[in-house]
Image: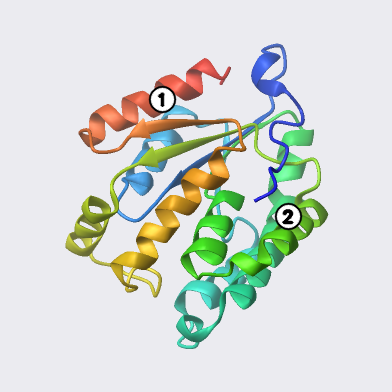
Amino acid sequence: MQKIKPALRGILYDMSRKEIFIVIEGGEGSGKTSVLEHLKGLFSDAVHTREPGGSGYAEELRSLVLQSQYAKNADGLTQLLLMYAARRDHLNHTIIPALEMGKRVISDRFAASSWAYNICGQEQRHLEEFFNTLHIQVVGKWDPDAYIFLDVPVEVGIARRKSAGGEDHFDQRKLDFHQRVYNGYKEFLAGQTHRCVDATQSLEKVKADVEDLIRGMGI
């Protein structure tokens, strides 16, 4: 994979500026949803958003991508294109306006998920160059300043997710799919500004570790 240039605005190192774009990532059962709810209470002045979704049109695309009865039969390229269509609308109507107004943005997932799920999980490695071209055209200079990855072994995460219920078609896939997703995250994040949090710890410790990382980024 060609590395996508991270942190183009360099805001992590300029604490005089308020705007910063942080993404929380994690596989199934990593505790990501609980962590994000915790962050909403801590940083109420930030724009809290999600992918796919985060804007009106993107939320409609989210329903198609995750809940349509036909979604599980769509190949990686179809899913990738839908994800980036949603991402473009999300950027145009939520993320970019917030950053230009000097606000902080915390997003549940971004491009790392597209690479992990659509390229690696769905075994579409022949689309690597296309992914990079698509990303540059859609995202441009608006890459996140940092990713925070909630790191949990695949077997542990899947067991947690099944006990919690509420599965979509990605959750229902076999263990080898989720292992490819996990490896894809590691691969993608190696080329990005990122931090990893041990998500095998207690949920309260994971929340505290993420909070400490974000406060260290100037929020």
Q: Is any atom of residue 161 visible in this view?
A: yes
Q: Position of residue 60 (x, y in %)?
A: 60, 72
**Is the Cβ of the residue at disc 1 closer than 8 Å to that at disc 2?**
no
Q: Is residue 119 left or right of residue 129?
A: left
Spatial distance from mark 1 to mark 2, Cα to Cα?
Answer: 31 Å
* Amino acid type at image mark 1: Glu
Q: Along the line of sight, which residue is nearer the eye, 62 or 130?
A: 130
Among the 4 quarters of the image, the one containing residue 86: bottom right
Label number found at residue 132: 2
Mark 1 crowdedness (10 Å alpha carbons): few <14, some 14-19, many ≥20: some
Q: Residue at position x 82%, y 56% from top?
A: 137
Q: Along the line of sight, which residue is nearer the eye, 32 or 105?
A: 32
Q: Is any atom of residue 110 visible in this view?
A: no
Q: Is residue 182 left or right of residue 138?
A: left
Mark 2 crowdedness (10 Å alpha carbons): few <14, some 14-19, many ≥20: some
* Amino acid type at image mark 2: Asn
Give the residue pinned by disc 1: 211
Q: Quadrant of the C terminus?
A: top right
N-terminal of the pair, mark 1 or mark 2, is: 2
Q: Position of residue 70 (x, y in %)?
A: 50, 88
- The image shows residue 149, relative to residue 79, as above or below, that is above
**Does dot 2 land on a helix, a strand or a loop?**
helix
